[in-house]
Image (tube, helix red, strand yellow):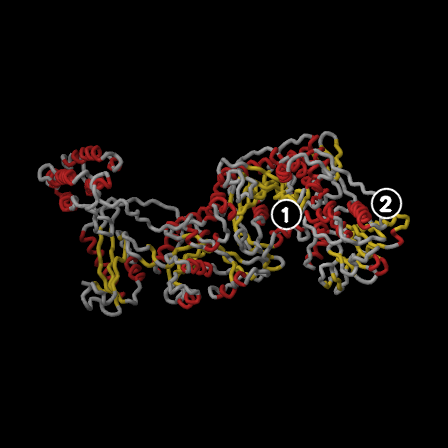
Amino acid sequence: MKVSLNWLKEFVEVPVDTRRLKADLVSIGLNAESSQAVGEDIVLDVEVTSNRPDCLSHYGVAREVAALYRKRLAPLEFICKESSAPASAEASIDILNPKLCARYCGRVIRGVEVKPSPDWLVRRLEAVGQRSINNVADVTNYVLMELGHPLHAFDLTRLEGRKVIVRSAKAGEQLQTLDGVSRTLVATDLVIADATRPVALAGVMGGEKSEISDNTQTILLESAWFDPVSIRRTSKSQGLHTEASHRFERGADIEMAPVALDRAAVLIAQLAGGEILRGVIDVYPSPKIRTFIELHRSEIQRVLGAEVPWEEVERVLRTLGFQVERRGTEGWRVTPPSFRQDVERKIDLIEEVARHYGYNRLPSRVRPAPPRLIAGQTRNKELEISSTLVALGYREIIPSAMIDPEENAKFTERPPVPLENPLSQDAAAMRSSAVPSMVHTLKWNLDRYRSDLRLFEMGRVYSARAKGLPEERRVLVLGATGNREPASIYSAEKKIDFHDLKGDIEEVLDCFNLPDLRFEPAAAPYLEKGSAGRFVSGEAALAILGSLRADLADEYKLRGRTVWLAAIELDALLSAALRQPSYKPISKFPPVERDFSLVIPRSTPYGRLQEAIRGLGIEELRSVAPVERRLPGDKELPEGAIPPGHVSLLLRITFQSPTRTLASDEVETQSRRIVAALGPLGVQIRG
Amino acid sequence: MSESETENRIPPKKARSRSRMSIDDKTNKTLKDLDVKTPEAIGELFAELSLALDSERQHLIGEGASDDHERAQKVKALRDRWLARKGGQVSLIDENWLKKAPKELKPTVGRAFNQLRQQSASVETEQLLQDVPIRGSATAHPETTKAEFGVGRPSVDITLPGYRRPLGSIHPVTRVMREIEDIFLGLGFSIESGPEVESVYYSFDALNIPESHPARDEWDTLYVNSETVLRPHTSPVQIRAMKKHGAPLYILCPGKAYRHDNPDSTHATMFHQVEGLAVDTDITFADLKGTLEYFAKKFFGDKIKTNFSPSFFPFTEPSGELVISCVFCGGEGCRVCKESGWVEVMGCGMVHPEVLRHGGIDPERYSGWAFGLGVERFAMMKYDINDIQLFHQGDVRFLEQF
């Protein structure tokens, strides 16, 4: 809402400079964001919240300024010089739908001369962002800006039967509105019709047929009150938002209707000549009466935490137009004015008091919340996971959760959640897999010359369900490519591989107490076959990992890079308990290491060796670690040292007892048992 | 006599004399005098010696020396102390412990003694007179002069960068969110969350924003269908939490929200909010003001000034905006605050009685306050970021700055 300072000053004295005025308006909730000089005037840009249609006018803002500076608000008194001919003989008004049109006031002005407006009017309208049309139309706009009540002027001679009927539209009826658009109406649209057809979309926009033209001589001036919900519905269904609909859908002042009508009539007579016919045709079937609200002092105290003096409460409410009647020592009966449809309850009155008393004058206190245990808080677990990942070199990303459903389908069979009004096809659904978001982010960086990447996201995936809200699961996705460490004088470069990712996931899983955790082969639509695996705890699959399928990597143009991906079920992880450390005494006796140089068939996975060794139940066994693995043809070994189809493996086994120093013959005995247990797996001892 | 006390921090000379006393004390006695009778105790005794030897070697390496001569002398001292044929620790152990050990303990003492002897032999063989090579490279820097370093002949090029393993990073939005959470957790609040794909009822109606009210237009909403939306704010969690936990309730709801906004430098389709809610029997506007002032000063620094101005939100009444003095110009006026010296940081207010009722809480008995803030906006203010799109692109050149 643009507010001209000169215009404002016609209704109230402004005792401060513009800078101060803006700050003071902000302090009462009228957000005066900026101001600019327009000629000799200053125009403020005031943001009016949707609950305050009364401030969508100069008079409304003046009322707030009057309360703010304790100044007098000029009363509205407009006296029409009427002719003796009664208006009711020239035109008739009929409201068929009084629920949607509670009041319709009309005046007839005869013998006007439609012509350009005088300079002062043009300037004032332009200052507040309105284009000048002609003197009659300009007056209606002027009154709209001044008093906030939308008016409309019809060319009375163009109304069939000199009649105005307020009714619901018939489905399919046509109306050409002032913006030149031919509109097909629906039954919920409220229209102003003459005897035969609609002539205006009530409260939204007039029609072309009955528009004021240069030849117009007799006008019917409309000042009505329409139901906010109905206007909003019509404005939405017709996609038409106007100054009028903006005010009506927020709630216009029903008592302002005749006042604004008189104001306009006076101005038209002044600027366009003509005679104002006698009387207002005022159809107001059931006048609205505002009921009072009981307000107790204790309630103000209860909400604001402060005593506001009696006099202050009364002054604020009265200057804002409320009727205040003191009730004994405990409170008031307050009747809100007709222009404050937003005030219905005690709390609304308390807000008015607080607003003008000043938020910054109210007290402050800070107290901690009383302790209350609320179960299921997962924040600590999330922190544990993310700090582990940061230590492992992963950077957190937060990509968009919206996706092209076709792309989504390449990663998962779960249905995504399609949007009804997406911004683009790229973001037409809520993803049911977070892996594509990771692939996109890796690509984004690869395309920008960053090639050593380790990223993670803790986010959600969404999938549609037959009934109710979609399912939302929390997931953790890891993505990695390039070198684990870049080459430097301190270390050679080392490419990220499957076991890097596997180890990283093991570190994360190790934060939790996960019973029966095992690792097994797995498959996913987006992972390269044969090199994917998953962690399972009990019945629940916790994490799957592998490399992005080569053809998908090509599709994404990943520059021939191998991209490692893991998807972890965060909900399952977060529902597990954090691992509770439990101290075991540290052995005081020296550990003994034994290296076993093995030749094993390639088809025998390492896991089986480990199982066979662990299966012996050797109490003193501390650890089993693969130290070196060589393939046939290794240059450092004599030719033929490893037969084809085999690999050599150096296994380092550590023994240690908590109670004694191990004797060498003990270690030898156990070593022989280990070799024996490996035999059935086709393992030979080398050298 | 504890070894750990003497490590590194105490000047080496003093440390050595003290540790020598304790070790010399022992090696000059027999096992019997020391009351060592079990293999276990022997193990402990040798472990202590082994540690002492190691730590003395470390001191020597770490200590530095003004020249080769001094260094050579130090090495010699260490060697004499441990390996001298007469009075060296090794020979003392041989004499006093091994030879005088009871028969049944001899093998144990013998094994341990051999290990220690090997370890101490390294004192002899170690190239302590040479530069300590830097890791991964055998290149030393003999040409570096004393003058360049000022502390004598260097053993290492200390101007080479430190060896830093690549660490990851936490997203700035998460950082800010955690910082906010920490402040409120400190005040006793708990964390709540709710669905992002949310019903129209929880997103609007229960928050006193009926379809028929123009206020509804202030949320440009992404729809799944006529009854389901991507939540345009985190406020629905308020209602869910009230229904789930009842009053009194002090919660924080951080999370994602979505708007039908075309992306530009200040708008993102997906963004993060933190919603706060306190409901109790005696909550007033003073609690709202006090808590948010406390929060703003904790987050932005205690130099900022705070201000509350009235506003309108359908779910609170009275409603307000928390305004703080501009963090960039300190209130003088700049581009960021549009020359006003002030910036709006969040919307807040007393929970509307209708909203409490929708949450199943009696507004006659309880009252509450609530706020909602945009995390990206906070991060932009905190880290001087001028484009909201940066948060969701995942560009490592951006992420590595946090």
Task: Measuring from the top left, give residue A213's x and y in whole percent.
Answer: 78, 58
Q: Chain of mark 2?
A: A
Distance from Cα at disc 2 to Cα at disc 1: 55 Å
Q: Secondary structure at mark 1?
A: helix
- How crowded pointer 2 is (Cα within 10 Å; few <14, some 14-19, many 20+) is rated as few
- Name the spot of residue B131 as percent of width and height, x first: 19, 45
**Residue type at the position of mark 1:** His
Which kind of residue does numbered mark 2 sit on?
Lys
Picture coordinates of residue A80 (x, y %)?
84, 45
Task: Determine the chain carrying the residue at label 1.
Answer: B
Which residue shows up at 25% across the image and 34% down it? Answer: B10
In the displayed structure image, the side of residue A304 where residue B173 appears, left or right: left
Which residue is situated farthest in the left direction here?
B86
- Between A270 and B51, the one nearer to me in the picture: A270
User: Residue A244 has which mark?
Assistant: none
Work out whether disc 2 and disc 1 sit on a shared chain: no
